[in-house]
Image (cartoon, rainbow, N blue to C red):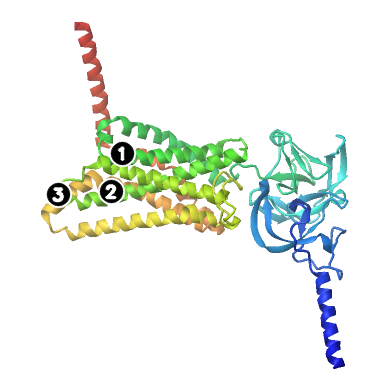
Amino acid sequence: MMLSIRYVIIFLLLQVKRLQLAPLTNGALCPFKDTIDLSGKRPLENGSYIHENVLISRTQVAEYKFHLYFGNNARETKTHLRGCVCGKPKMCVKLCCRHDEFYNEYTFRCERIPKDTKINVYMKITMDSGKKQWVNIYQRFVLQMGRPCQYLEYLLGDKDLWELKENGELFISRTGDIIDTVSYCLSPYWKEDSKELQLMALSCPILNEAKFSLTLNTYAMAISVIFLVPTTLIYLFVGDLSRDIRGKQLISYFISLIGAYSIFSFINISEYVFEDFYCKLLGISSYFFFTSTYQWLSILCYDMLLNFRHLKENSLYRRHTKRFVYYSSYGWGTALLFTLIVIWAQLSDKVPDKFKPGIGNEACWLDTNQWSSAIYFYWPNLIIMLVNVTIFFSLSLHIYRIKHDVAAMKLTKKFFGEYCVIILRLFIVMGISWIMDILSFCLRNFEISEYVFMATDFCNALQGVLIFIIFVLKHNVIQAIRKSCFRGDFIAVNSRERATSS
């Protein structure tokens, strides 16, 4: 009996001890920016922690289920402990990397600093009184560690003048913004006129990442727009080209590409740091146009198959007025529906952060660092492209089966010359490049993929030039343009003659 009571007492004492050491879980005790991640740190016997010689009591430890990144964008994470460390009494600054590392803006990674390299840890900060004072950053502040985004940029030059304030916040002179440690970090940096490393601020302006491939593709898209605009105008105003349903479908496809490429190249070429609202608006608009390009390409493929099935009537399926209305409802309507779903998912509290599109998180586009972007863009479009491939294989099989039917083959040749070859060229040039673009996203985490898909991404960005070559630099199109121009000259001459005679 006494033995049983002893076991009960020991059990109760252990439970009391466990409760004493257990962290508080009743929500955040201080702003996220004032905390550090305690994962991997051992608590003291009383449940407290020590970081940078600062004692974090058990009452200042809580469980967090999210992480804040640049612009205070929250993302769900595994439950982890964080402790309030800033302002007790020191304020905090954040390092991008560990003490013995620096951030390489070309590889976007933290790399080890060579031995015997001196780091100047003194910086001039702005006091609350407005005075400037040189301080030892490592002694003046508590050091946090982490990066606000994947692709950081050093704030250098006259355009990115900044001041570190006494409270650990960063003041950006050009924009007048004040950002905290959630949106910036410090890293040692080699200045050209210095033999030692100096601490420099980095942040994530909502601009394109400074990568050669992105810059190349951006200017390729801008060049594409230059070629797409005259192509669209030619197909709009030359009657022979826009009279049939195929011409109308091509015009719709061209307009989608112009909208998508114009917005995307404007975002990346512009030096302007867009406000959050306008950044999201541009991202959603480009999403709408990019989605509609896939829809119109699928419409072109489907209509080609539909025309082939009507070859038995000795003519192509020409009742296209009502049919084009249906196609337009599908092409633009589906893109609009997908866009509304993206807007809802972005704004809804019911959608977990890991499933949100992430437009505006790190760029004015879907957050491609998360797999959630595949749900809204890459996977649906991959399905569309696979359906298009199936249509082409089905069409090829039909043609192979009727090759012994002379009459049918004669009509098939007419169909090929008038319709199928054009769409086939379009799919090979555009469809394959879109598929490669999807694959490059799926394999983006492999370093070699950036070099493998650079050429295909560049060809994809140059679609406007390829379209101009395929659809304008053709004998029948040039003849139609000449015919239209001469007809206009003839009408103008006759008008002048009638005016003179009267």
Residue 325: percent from the left, percent from the top?
31, 41
On residue 313, the disc is 3
User: Callout 2 environment at 10 Å: few (<14), some (14 to 19), or many (20+)?
Assistant: many
Q: Of the two numbered discs 2 and 1 on the same chain, state the one appearing first in sequence.
A: 1
- Label 1 Cα crowd, 10 Å radius (few <14 / some 14-19 / many 20+): some
Q: Mark 2 points at which residue?
A: 303
Question: Looking at the image, which is closer to me, 15 or 387?
Answer: 15
Q: Mark 1 and mark 2 in contact (Cβ < 8 Å)?
A: no
Q: In which quarter of the image is residue 252?
A: top left
The C terminus lies in quadrant = top left
The disc at residue 248 is: 1
Q: Does residue 243 lie above or below 434 as drawn?
A: above
Compared to 391, does 184 lie above or below? Answer: above
Instruction: Give the total number of marks visible in the rendering.
Output: 3
Q: Which amino acid does label 3 sit on?
A: Glu
Q: Which amino acid does label 1 sit on?
A: Lys
Whether residue 459 is visible, yes or no, is no
Q: In this view, does 408 lie above or below 17?
A: above
| Real-space Cα separation, disc 2 to disc 1, in angstroms | 12 Å
Q: In which quarter of the image is the N terminus?
A: bottom right
**Residue at image coords 87%, 92%:** 2
The residue lying toward the viewer, choosing from 485 and 176, is 176
Label at residue 457: none
Horizontal side of 88 relative to 317 (left or right) equals right
SS type, badge 3? helix
